[in-house]
Amino acid sequence: MRTVVLVGLPGCGKSRVGRALALELGWEFLDSDAEIERRCGRTVQELFQEAGEREFRSLEREVIRGLAGRSQAVIATGGGAVLSASSRRLLRAAGPVYYLRVPVDALVRRIGAKSHRPAFAGGVREALERMWRDRDAIYGEVGRAVDAARPVGAVVKEILALLGEERQGQGGSRCTLGESAERSPSRRTRRGRYTAPRASCSKR
């Protein structure tokens, strides 16, 4: 197992769960949106407004291709990353994928009734309901669904248990909460560190 990938709608907790999971595993935490912003010197929102979704998705695919080649990393993807068939193939090949599934009502409470994100221009609830209709089946096809409406610790504990089951199925040892990090103390100093490969993007 090289990586663990998290997918889901905006507000589902990919970054929070990803950082906490990386801490437990003693792995790096990688965020595709953060890497895009780092390389371009602009926010995701600015890129959507200035370059359009088509160009943004192209850059996102390039970034995901780089992230998917990493080892011992937890990868949090942007909410729309699964819309690209090539990105879906890359993510599935990288390692186990988990869909952080959260009902729309809970997502609205987390994000708030108002948001400056371009994707929510028509209203947060309306946008999330549309995304749910369009993406829920895709998320479920790409990864195993995990109830992420619960506290972060509970979500991380379930994912660790599922990883343990996968390792057992592959003939490896079972991984329980905190066990992987304890077995690899040399990596504990890297817990949650953010690093990512370079991607091309012209700055303005």
Image (cartoon, grey):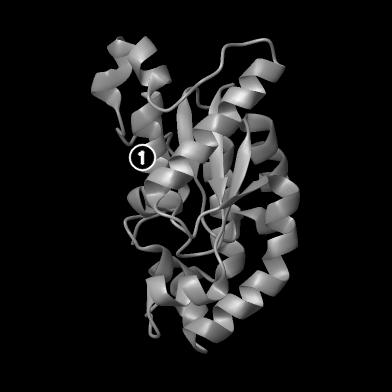
Position of 82 with respect to 74 (left or right) is: right
Q: Secondary structure at mark 1?
A: helix
Place of residue 31 in the rendered image (x, y in percent of width and height, measured from the top left): 42, 45
Quarter of the figure that contains the C terminus: bottom left
Instruction: Name the spot of residue 177 as percent of width and height, x first.
Output: 42, 28
Q: Nearer the viewer, residue 65 or 140?
A: 140
Q: Quadrant of the N terminus?
A: top right
Callout 1, which amino acid? Ala
The residue pinned by badge 1 equals 20
Residue count near mark 1 (Cα–Cα under 10 Å), binned few <14, some 14–19, many ≥20? many
Indicate whether 59 appears above or below 172.
below
Residue drawn at point x = 58 percent, y = 28 percent: 163
x, y percentage for residue 181? 36, 19
The residue under the point 54% across, 45% down is: 6
Q: Is residue 181 left or right of residue 157?
A: left
- Between 94 and 105, the one lying in front of the other is 105
